Image (cartoon, grey):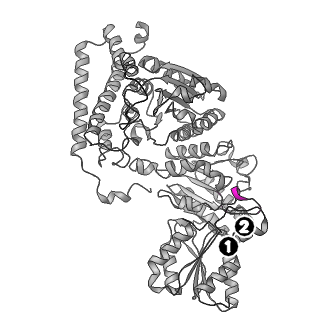
Amino acid sequence: MKTELAQYRKEELLRILTIMQTIRAFEEKAGMMYGLRKIGGFCHLYTGQEAVAAGAISSLDLSKDYVVTAYRDHGHAIACGMDPKKAMAELFGKVTGCSHGKGGSMHLFDLEHHFLGGNGIVGAQIPVAAGVAFAQQYQGTGGVTVCFFGDGAFHQGSVHETFNLAKIWNLPIVFIIENNQWGMGTNWKKVSAVDDFSATAGAYGMKGYSCDGLDVLEVRATIEKVVSEARLGRPSVVEARTYRYKGHSMSDPQKYRTREEIDEYRKRDAIQSFVAKLTGEKILSEEEWKDMIQRISAQIEEAVAFAEESPEPALSELYTDIYA
Amino acid sequence: MPELTYREALNRAMDEEMARDEKVFLIGEEVGEYDGAYKVSRGLLAKYGPKRVRDTPISELGFTGLGVGAAIVGLRPVVEWMTHNFALLAVDQVMNNAAKLRQMSGGQISVPIVFRGPNGPAEFLAAQHSQSLGGFWMHVPGLKVVAPATPSDAYGLLKSAIRDDNPVVMLEAELMYPWKGEVSEQEFLVPIGKARIAREGEDVTLITYSKPIRMVEEAAERLAEKGVRAEVIDLRSLRPLDEETVVNSVRKTGRCVVIDEAWPMASPGVTVAQLVNSRCFDVLDAPVELVSGEDVPMPYNHTLELAAQPSVEKVIAAVGRVLYREDL
C-alpha cells in the first residue's frame, strides 16, 4: 500500500480525492433536487462509481486527450473539470447550463475541457469516440480518447464494430467498461456470454485489462499504463468492476436487488477506502478531510443556488443551436 | 462547356475539395482499392493515399459513427454509403448523433460531415435494394438533405455540402451515375436550399427531385405537344426546402403535380403537397396530385418493378386530372 501511494505526490492524491468527493456530493445533491422536482426526466446517478471516473480521467492530459461517455455522465463531466454550477444548472434546465438547458442530465458537454458528452442511446457514443481518436491520429495531436460505457452497452453491435475499427487502424483509444453489474434491472451475468469483458479484447487483437473499480489507485495505475500504450497506437479494453448505489435512474424502485447487496458494497466504499489509506499513511488528517468535505459541500450549495437563480431559456432559444 | 457524367462530377468535387482542404477525407466500403462500388471515387486513393481515402470493413454503424466523431473535433469526413439501404444500419448515428450533437451541447459542437450514396430504385434489385429513403433524413431537424439531379448540381452541391458546417445527407442514384451533362470548367458552388426551375411553363407546375427529373421532363415535352405548358421544378434540396420557388410557381400556374419515387405515406412528396395546399390554397384550381411510388416493397420482376414507380404516363394522367382534361 505504501509503495502504491508513494508513486504520487500528495497534491495529486488530494486532487483525485477531491474529484471523487465532488462527484459524490454533487450526485447526492442532484438526487435531493430530483426529489424536490427541480430536475426532471431521466437522471442517472454515478454514486458508488466515483473511483472509475476519478482514477481514469485524472491520468489524462486534457489539453490533447478527450473523454466520451454515455448518459450516467455527471461524474465524468466533473472529473474533466466542468464547473459544478454549469452541470447543476443544466440539470435544472437553465440557460446557464453547459448545454443551455437543452441537453439535461444525459447530455452534459464541455468542449473546453475536452468532454464530449453525454450520450443517451446505449452504445451510440462508442463509434463516435473512435472517430475522435481517428482525428487525433489523422492530425498527429498525440492525444488519446477515453471511451466509457457500461456492462449493458457491451452487448450492442456498436461495441464490436468499434473494437474492430480501433484495432485495424491502431487508433489511440482506450475503452473502459464500467461494469456496475446492473444493466438497468438486469444482472450482467444473466446477459453476458463471458464472465470477464476484458477477455473479449483478444478477439480483436487488443489487450484487455481488469481492475478493481472500487480502488481508485488501481484504476489510475491501469489507465496510466493503457493510455501510454494508446499513445503509441495500441488501443485496449479495460473492465473496471464497480457498483452503483442508486437505481438505474431516479425512477427505479430497485426490486431486482437486495438491500444487503448494496450494504455489502457500501462497506467497500471507494471514497471511504481511499480516505482510510490516506489517513493511515498520514497523507491526510481527519481535520483536512473534514475541511475538504465542507469546502466541497459549500461549492455544491453554490451550484444549487446558481442553478436556482439562473433564468429559464427564452422561448426564442427554441430554434437556436441547431444549425451551425 | 465540357460534358461530365454525374459520377465524374461527384469525383471532381471530392478531388477539388480534398486538394483544397487537408481536413477532408473519404471513408466507406470499397472507396479505395476498388475505386468505389460505383466508381465515384475513382483515382482518389492513388492521388491522396490511404490516410485520406479509407476503405472500411462492412460496418455501417461503426464507420458512420466514426465519421461523426472525427467531425466533432474538426475533420470534414465524406462518408460514402454503398447505398442508402445499407445506411439503415447507421440511422442511429445520423439521427441521434450527427443531427443532435450541436443542439444537445447548446451549440458547443458542430458536425461538418457529408453522408452520400445512391438512393431509390435502380433495376432488378428487389425490395431491400430499391428504396427511396430521402424522407427518413428529411424528417430530422439538424440535418440538411440534398438531391442533385444533374451532373452540374451534383458537383456544385457536393462542394457546398463538404464546406457546410452541418451534417448533409446527399441522395444520388445508381442509374444517374452515367448521366451526362454540361459542367462549367470554372469552379462553382450550388447553394443548399435553392430549387431549380428546369423548364418554364404557365399551365401546371410539376415538382420533383433526383432521378425522376428526366421522366418528368419527358412528360413535360409530351404535354407540350398537346399544348400544355408545364413548369418543372427540381427541388435539389429537401431540407431546407425552397418554399418560395415552389409557391411562386404554383401561384403562377394554379395547378400542381408532385412526383416522388418514394412510398406515398409520410414522404417528401406529401410534405411538398401539404406546403402547396397550405400556401397556395386560394389560387389552386384543382387539388394537388401526388404521383408516388406504389405502396409496396419493390418486386424483382421488371414489369412489376416498373409498374411500382412513377412513369411518364402516370404523370400525364395526373396533369389531366388537375387540368380536368380527359384527352391527355
Residue A160 visible in the snapshot: yes
Residue A42 location (% of width, % of height): 38, 41
The residue depicted at 65 percent of the width and 62 percent of the height is B172
**Most foreground residue, B113 or A271:** A271
Chain of residue at mark 1: B
The 10 Å Cα crowd at callout 2, few under 14, some 14 to 19, many 20 or more, is many
Question: In the picture shown, does residue A166 fall above or below A14?
Answer: below
Query: Taking A97 as reference, is B31 left or right?
Result: right
Question: In the picture shown, does residue A9 fall above or below B317?
Answer: above
Query: Taking A298 as reference, is A192 left or right?
Result: right
Q: Which mark is residue B4?
A: 2
- Residue picked out by circle 1: B310
The residue depicted at 53 percent of the width and 85 percent of the height is B286
Membership of B127 in magenta stretch: yes
Question: Label 2 sits on what residue type?
Answer: Leu
Tell me where the magenta segment starts and ends, as one range: B117-128
SS category of the residue bearing label 1? loop
Dividing the picture into quadrants, the one containing residue A120 is top left
Quadrant, the C terminus of chain A: bottom left
Question: In the picture shown, does residue B190 fall above or below A22?
Answer: below
Quadrant, the N terminus of chain A: top left
The residue depicted at 56 percent of the width and 44 percent of the height is B65
